[in-house]
Image: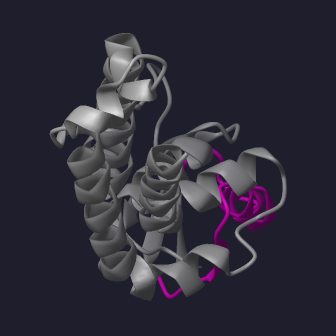
Amino acid sequence: MKDRSVLAGSLVAGLLASACCIGPLVLGVLGLGSLGFAAALAPLRPWFLGLTAVLLAIGFYFAYRPQPAEACAPGRACAKPASRTRQRIALWVVTALAVALATYPGWGARLTASRASSAAGQFENAVVVLDVQGMTCTACAGEIERELRQVPGVVRADVSFEQRRAEIALSTVRPKVQPLIAAIEKAGYRATVGDQ
């Protein structure tokens, strides 16, 4: 029982460590927006990562420690090596998930990196600059770009995490800003019209 709680705790800590990046995406898909949840968790990320490491270390200790002879008596849990094998497999699966979630800000940005999305025959007739609030890592910029590219008339979307801005090129002469702001809000962030 103790081993299961350590595995569950390390997975929860890994989820919380990546909540600043994955949270707005999940909440945006659900139509809830980030609600400031990710921004509140971002400063706590190092603590969650440390907690994840500690809980995983405890899990590995329990999974691989030598068992005393009296614990391996017939009818005891140690007498069934299959249960220990399942425990170790579960520990490695949770470790892989925790590492994937904890490193998401690094590889998530590259996964959703800006692609040359200029469609054939579409020219940039107007550029809109928006200030974006709520981004906590570079992966956030990729998620916003993906949502902006789905807006009709968008030829190119470049979002800068460092500058906290989005530059959107449109094929229309008179761009409407509200659909662009709505797309950013759908991704779980807030936007206002910025300086050109």
Q: Is residue 59 magenta?
A: no
Q: Is residue 114 visible?
A: no
Left or right: residue 110 versus residue 34 is left
Q: Is residue 72 above or below residue 49?
A: above
Residue at x-position 21% and y-position 50%? 61
Rendered location of residue 149, percent (x, y): 56, 40
Number of numbered discs on residues: 0
Q: Is residue 171 magenta?
A: yes
For the residue pair 129 and 7, the one nearer the viewer reads as: 7
Rendered location of residue 43, percent (x, y): 41, 87
For the residue pair 53 and 49, the one nearer the viewer reads as: 53
Residue placed furthest toward the right: 31
Rendered location of residue 70, percent (x, y): 29, 36
Rendered location of residue 182, percent (x, y): 77, 60
Residue at x-position 68% and y-position 42%? 151
Q: Which residues are magenta?
A: 169-196
For the residue pair 113 and 117, the one nearer the viewer reads as: 113
Left or right: residue 21 versus residue 70 is right
Residue at x-position 31% and y-position 69%? 49
Q: Quadrant of residue 18?
A: bottom left
Left or right: residue 47 versus residue 8 is left
> Which quadrant would the N terminus be assigned to in this image?
top right
Q: Is residue 43 visible?
A: yes
Q: Quadrant of residue 94?
A: top left
